[in-house]
Image (cartoon, rainbow, N blue to C red):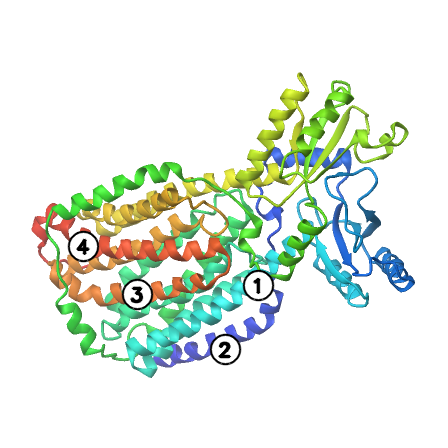
Amino acid sequence: MNKLVKALRVAIPAVFVVLLVLYLPKIRVENSLERWVTPSSPEIARYGDFLEQFGGGAAFLVVLRDPGGFESDTARDALMALWDRLTELPDIDGVSVYPPPVYRLKRRLDKSISVFIVAFTPPSRLNPNRPELLKAVRNLLKDVPFESHLAGTGVLHEAINEETQKYTLSFIGLGLLFLMALLLLVLKSAKAFLMTMGVSAGGVSTLLLAAAVFRIPLSMVTVILPVLVLFYGTSGSLHVLFHRGDFRKVVAPCFMAVLTTAIGFLTFWPSSIPLLKDFAVLGTAGIAGGFAWAFLLFFPRRYAFEPRADIERIFRRFPVFSRRSILLIFLGVAAAMVPGILKLKADIYSLDIISPSNPRVIDHHFVERNVSRYVPLEYTVEIDKADPRELNGWISAVLELDEVDGAVSYLSFPSSERSKSRYVSPDGRTGRVTFFIPTLSTSRGLALADRIAGLAAAKMPGVRPSVNGYVTLYAVVAEELKKAFVSSLALAFALIFLVMAAFLRNARLFAASILPNVIPVACVIGLMGWSGLTLNMATVPIGCLMLGILVDNTFHLLFWYKKTGGLREAFREAAPGMVLTMAILSVGFSVFLFASSPPIRYFGILSLATLAAGLAGDCILLPVLVRMLDSKGTRRPENV
């Protein structure tokens, strides 16, 4: 048996290394809107109808600046040569000069600026990202003697993909450095260090391998997962090591802890948003993989590890709280957070998740300052109901809004050309109006749409323009995010506490376990609402994820309480692993504080706050509740 185990401990890592070499290059990154929007959403169908009627092409702007104003023959020849070479690129539908004569813009272009609109065929309706095409255009721009900038929705999507890749790699690298330094400080044993790092690295490898094998793209939602799995993998290892390396002593609470953390991820599986399903699968794969590697490397007893005596001495003096006033304090804090929970909203802002120093963002701001805002806000009207003078009056009123830089409508075209334009439907009954606005958050975009609707009601009584395009789609995403947050959190509470009840098989201990885990999660959600933080791509997992992690300590403490018969004895057994695990996880989540993206930084801050509140709940509130509900905190030892 020992020979078989030793052979497996060599063979399985070797196979993993081979698989990683073969499959890691196949990992891809994707953040397109089609990964965020529910496929069955009515807004998707409405947007599809809009594209069927008016065309579904995509475009980006090529902005060139020449201090000489393109007056020289050399500059003009370079412009024409670039035009010709752009039209020859694959998937290009056409190149034209910006702005077209039909556009109504507030500002005139400076003579030193020349702009091309490049129309191309997108991969799909909701994915305007063609990185190979943008790369080809940038290669062409290297040969022109002008300052150049690219802008467009597809360009920003490319930037988000770049940020995803950058954050994933940098977080893993920084996390490894932090974890190695911390483990060397705590363990001071080369063998224990290597085994613990092996478990953590094995979990991350399992996650990445699952992404490659099942063709699940990485995204801004999943950038937190490698670091979380890396540091969470130390949890079981530390509990094993602080029980002299005997996995058999802690296998039950370790398994239950892994199960509830996996449940925290899996509650996103029922979501109709594809990216949240990806998050559920990859998170579960990483957590389950980490436990499998712990079982492989530690079970049943790999070697007799002796914990540091100074650390053990600290936890022998661990205080056991009993004052009932502590319960009132916790309940009071939770009650103060309830209004904040009710204030919580979902909001998405694409530029918020991209570093301000990203070259694509710099290009974006240059184009908005020197050319025009370019994000289209689309409307349709029934032509036979819209009086042309009233419609033009509405458009002029909208153009006076600060956020709107330009407009184009079916009235901008001569009557003889309207049917051939993309601004009148094939049946001639519906007309299109486009306003050019900046990249806005969901809330600001909807507020602008409401103001435009108010102007329509004032200028065109009886006519109600229908809004369409990316603003409405992002509004759907925000609403779906909030629904997914609420439903997944409710499901996580139900399933995790069901597992807790089955594990404890004691109604009083189960009742004692609820508040120490509910209050920290409620507090962090309330803190988000009170501080104005929103649910977005990075923060939506915070509730379920942290609940799944926080209950780990409850499992370990109550497991040893049932086994030893006393709270002080339970703390002596469980506290070293509990506190050190929370400390190591806190170091792991602090990696996110180095992100230039505010949502990821806020996720890190909220996670740290939740871990601190959760540890306080288990170390301070849980003993009080156990003493209140279960024979003053003493009982006969049980075989568990």
The amino acid type found where label 1 is placed reads Gln
Viewer-proximal residue among 410 and 545? 410
How far, Cα to Cα, is label 4 from label 3?
Answer: 17 Å
Q: Quadrant of the C terminus?
A: bottom left
Residue 39 percent coordinates (x, y): 60, 40
Q: Are marks 4 and 2 in contact (CB under 8 Å)?
A: no
Residue depicted at x 38% and y 48% = 543
- Residue at the bottom extreme, as displayed: 190
Quadrant of the rendered image containing residue 235: bottom left
- CB under 8 Å between callouts 1 and 2? no
Q: Residue at x 39, y 37 (%)?
A: 343
> Which sits in the foreground, 459 or 420?
459
Task: Say above or below: 494 vs 504.
Answer: above
Going from N to C along the chain, the mark reached first, 1 or 2, is 2
Residue 294, given in percent of the width and then of the height, sits at 36, 69
Residue type at mark 3: give it. Ala
Closer to the chain start, of discs 1 and 3, is 1
Q: Quadrant of the N terminus?
A: bottom left
- Residue at (12, 46) in percent of width and height: 325
In this picture, residue 184 sits left or right of residue 466: left
| Residue underneath mark 1 | 165
Q: Amino acid at mark 4?
A: Ile
Instruction: Report which residue position mark 3 lands on.
Output: 583
Residue topped by disc 2: 14
